[in-house]
Amino acid sequence: MLKKTALKYLGYGKGEVPGEIDRLLDETILEIEKTAQPKAAAALFYLEQEPLRIQETGDRIPGNQMKELMADCEKCLLVGCTLGISMERKIKLYEKVDMTRAVVMDAAASAYLEQFCDAYEEKLGYPDRTYRACPGYGDFPLAFNQIIGKLLDISRKLGITITESGLMIPQKSMLGVIGIGDTGRKKSCESCVRKKDCPFRKRGERCYETD
């Protein structure tokens, strides 16, 4: 699954994979497994509707997509995951000496992070949950990373720094919001905010797996 996802990110979802890329991807996955130092944190909060906000702190959760996603939820789970600064340094090193390897490793690291986040989310034990919504997609502003980061104390717990613009360092990090208390809304192309400009749909693919 990890390799398949990485190939999607590289644009080889359905096409034939060159032997060099296939070999290089195998090598970089092994290197990522040795280099990455994955960490995760989560915290559960109650939700208030109209307007949508975190009850304990009063922080509003902006965006129409979040309002729709959380409409049937009583609580929300804030989650954060990272592969650590060592992964960041490894990719930066290859960008200086071997750009092809750097590109392949970047895609594989993104797939590795996604897989780690999914596994962590599953271990938390909430069967009735929405998919993970991350700031920066659709009308869910990137600036909300600052709020998630503060509430999860990611600087101390995960070693993540958030820039003024909302970007994260290390880059192979993720912050997200999951609704708790509905029937478990899943990802779908029709409900996706990137439906009209999705690179995967243009290639006849999906960015996620279906049951």
Image (cartoon, rainbow, N blue to C red):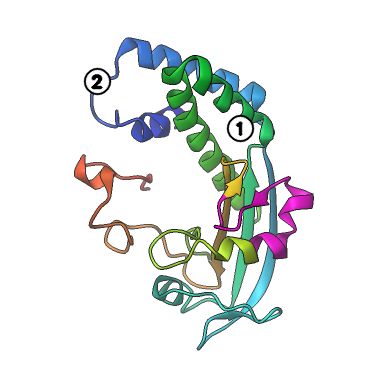
Q: Is residue 52 above or below residue 202?
A: below
Residue at the (43%, 26%) spot, across then down: 103
Looking at the image, which residue is at 68% across and 67% down? Answer: 44
In the picture, measured across the screen, residue 155 lies left or right of residue 137, that is right
Where 47 sits versus 196, above or below?
Answer: below
User: In the rendered image, which quarter is residue 148 located in?
Assistant: bottom right
Rendered residue at 52%/64% (across/down): 129
Instruction: Please give the residue where the numbered disc 1 appears in the rendered image.
Output: 88
Identify which residue, 102 or 125, lies in the foreground: 102
Q: In this view, does 87 lie to the left or right of 105?
A: right
From the viewer's side, name the closer residue of 73 and 10. 10
Give percent across and percent down for residue 91: 55, 26
Disc sitting over residue 16 in the figure: 2
Residue 186 is one of the magenta-drawn residues: no
Instruction: State the extent of the magenta-drawn residues as a range.
Output: 148-167
Circle 2: residue type? Glu
Type of amino acid at the residue the image marks with label 1: Glu
Q: Which residue lies furthest to the bottom in this view?
A: 50
* Mark sitting earlier along the chain (1/2): 2
Q: Nearer the viewer, mark 1 or mark 2?
A: 1
Percent of width and height locating residue 27: 51, 14
Q: Position of residue 134 (x, y in %)?
A: 50, 58
Q: In this view, does 11 lie to the left or right of 123?
A: left
Residue 127, can we see it? no
Q: In which quarter of the image is residue 176?
A: bottom right
Asked whether 191 or 134 is in front, the reply is 134
Residue 1 location in percent, x, y? 44, 32
